[in-house]
Amino acid sequence: MTTLLHVVCPHCHAVNRLPENRLADGGTCGKCHSQLFTGHPVELNESSFDLHISRSDLPIVVDFWAPWCAPCRGMAPAFEESTRQMEPRYRFVKLNTEQSQKIAARFNIRSIPTLAIFKNGQEIVRQAGAMDTGNIVRWVKNNT
């Protein structure tokens, strides 16, 4: 019996069911027909954040960042590369704390960049400070 995973579309935010044994095949959204996995982090905002965190069966790796933050900009290529290496077993997302201040406050984000991993709608771990690709990948694997 195949387990069906809920995967939220990075484009239209519709919740899709995808057989776990077909994750590597990628898949397309049943609503907008776009690819469910793009190899790039998904940009979320206040209207899409909770949907992705609460409805996805994949672990969600969140980069809390801001455009004025030099370490955030410096870590962005490493986060992008980590996404390419770890999809589709994980969903990597970015949340601009300047544009989504209510979410940043709700999760008590005090320094950026901060990475957090959510599973089943709950934050399970967080790490403040910039990391390179190898450290991001290792940190995610060690904490999920």
Image (spheres, rainbow, N blue to C red):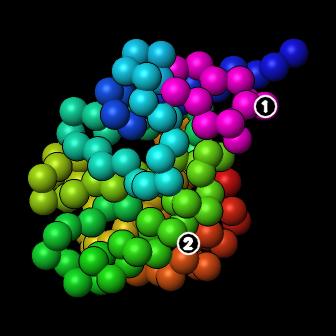
Rendered image: mark on residue 81 = none
Image coordinates of residue 34 in percent, x first then y, are 42, 30
Q: Residues within 10 Å of mark 1 (few under 14, many from 20)?
A: few
Q: Which residue is at a point 71% across and 24% down the rendered structure image? A: 19
Image coordinates of residue 139 in percent, x first then y, are 61, 70
Of residues 85 and 95, which is closer to you in this image? 85
Per the image, is 35 magenta? no
Image coordinates of residue 121 in percent, x first then y, are 48, 35
Of residues 38 and 92, which is closer to you in this image? 38
Part of the protein shown in magenta: 15-28
Is residue 5 something that shows in the picture? Answer: yes
Q: Which residue is at a point 17% across and 49% down the rendered structure image? A: 100
User: What residue does disc 1 label?
Assistant: 21
Is residue 106 something that shows in the picture? Answer: no
Per the image, is 17 magenta? yes
Rendered image: mark on residue 136 = 2
The three-letter code of the residue at mark 1 reads Asn
- Numbered label tally: 2
Of residues 14 and 116, which is closer to you in this image? 14
